[in-house]
């Protein structure tokens, strides 16, 4: 995307009532805050949008967006109080503590990923640069367990398979990770999958707690497979 203070040449693709939408053809003058993205999937998946902006500058941009929202959507005067600078992290990588990844059937087994921006195009992701590193390990191990038990991802065209999404939450503070599956229908091998994933996790941690919960009342059921202590 275009950054503040950049001079660009665009191609108008859609004209709306009070504004127009365009695609960047050429960046004539680059912003001094523009930088190289650190993730191989950036611009391909829909997980990030401003990796090409210097991290310190992104904090200032978020503060400006907050000030704009206060001015536009409230009756408050932003000049009547202090909005402090955004608190940023020491390391902008591997901070995301929750992922909700679509699952697909690949040539050699199930694969995980995200959708490309503004589309339903599936982008396979093996190692995300902003996901908690524990989550990246968990996704890999869960894939191995699914393949071992020959549990397929749900295929909307053929109306076959089980797993629609893999949801992983990880707490650095509590050192706990939760794995959940969004299923199209009841999975006969659920107990076997729980045991297999628990065995895989024991390679990553000395302590593990297995639990299996099936929530009813939804067309797709979310299965909380296990909460696990990560050392």
Image: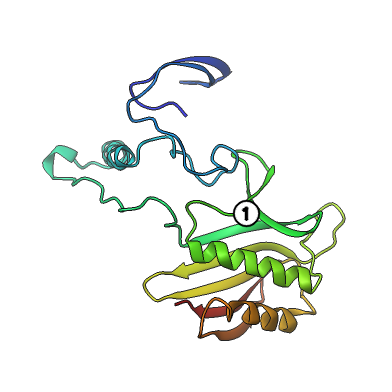
**Viewer-side residue, 218 vs 191:** 191
Q: How is the image coloured?
A: rainbow
Left or right of residue 82: residue 36: right
Q: Residue 105: x percent and y percent? A: 78, 57
Number of numbered markers: 1
With 77 as the anchor, is 62 left or right in this view? right
Q: Residue furthest front?
A: 203
Front residue of this view, candidates 57 and 224: 57
Q: Quadrant of residue 193?
A: bottom right
On screen, residue 99 above or below 187: above
Residue at 75% in and 60% down: 110
The image shows residue 231 at horizontal and vertical percentages of 44, 77
- Above-or-below relation of 79 to 126: above
Relative to 35, is 66 on the left or the right?
left
Q: Residues within 10 Å of mark 1 (few under 14, many from 20)?
A: some
Q: Percent position (x, y) of residue 185?
A: 77, 70
Is residue 172 toward the left or the right of residue 100 in the image? left
Residue 162 falls in which quadrant of the image?
A: bottom right
Q: Nearer the viewer, residue 224 or 149?
A: 149
Mark 1 lies on a secondary structure that is: loop
Where in the figure is residue 128, as x and y percent of width and height? 54, 52
The residue depicted at 35 percent of the width and 52 percent of the height is: 91
Residue indicated by mark 1: 126
Q: Residue furthest right?
A: 158
Residue 185 is at least partly visible in this image: no
Inspect this view and state whether residue 160 appears: yes
* Rendered residue at 77%/72% (across/down): 148
Residue placed furthest toward the left: 80
Residue 220 sits in which quadrant? Answer: bottom right
């Amino acid at each position: 995307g275009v950054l503040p203070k950049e001079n660009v040449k665009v191609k108008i693709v859609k004209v709306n009532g009070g504004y127009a939408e365009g695609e960047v053809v050429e960046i004539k003058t680059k912003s001094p805050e523009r930088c190289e993205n650190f993730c191989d999937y950036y611009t391909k998946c829909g997980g990030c949008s401003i990796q090409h902006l210097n991290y310190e500058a992104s904090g200032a941009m978020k503060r400006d967006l907050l000030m704009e929202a206060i001015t536009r959507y409230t009756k408050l005067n932003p000049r009547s109080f202090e909005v402090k600078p955004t608190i940023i992290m020491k390391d902008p990588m591997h901070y995301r503590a929750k992922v909700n990844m679509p699952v697909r059937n690949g040539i050699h087994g199930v694969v995980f990923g995200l959708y490309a921006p503004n589309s339903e195009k599936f982008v396979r992701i093996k190692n995300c640069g902003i996901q908690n590193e524990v989550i990246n390990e968990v996704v890999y191990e869960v894939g191995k367990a699914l393949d071992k038990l020959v549990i397929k991802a749900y295929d909307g065209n053929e109306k076959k398979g089980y797993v629609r999404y893999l949801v992983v939450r990880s707490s650095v503070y509590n050192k706990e990770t939760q794995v959940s599956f969004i299923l199209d229908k009841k999975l006969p091998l659920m107990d076997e999958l729980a045991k297999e994933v628990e065995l895989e996790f024991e390679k990553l941690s000395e302590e593990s707690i297995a639990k299996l919960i099936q929530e009813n009342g939804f067309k797709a059921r979310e299965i909380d497979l296990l909460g696990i202590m990560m050392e």
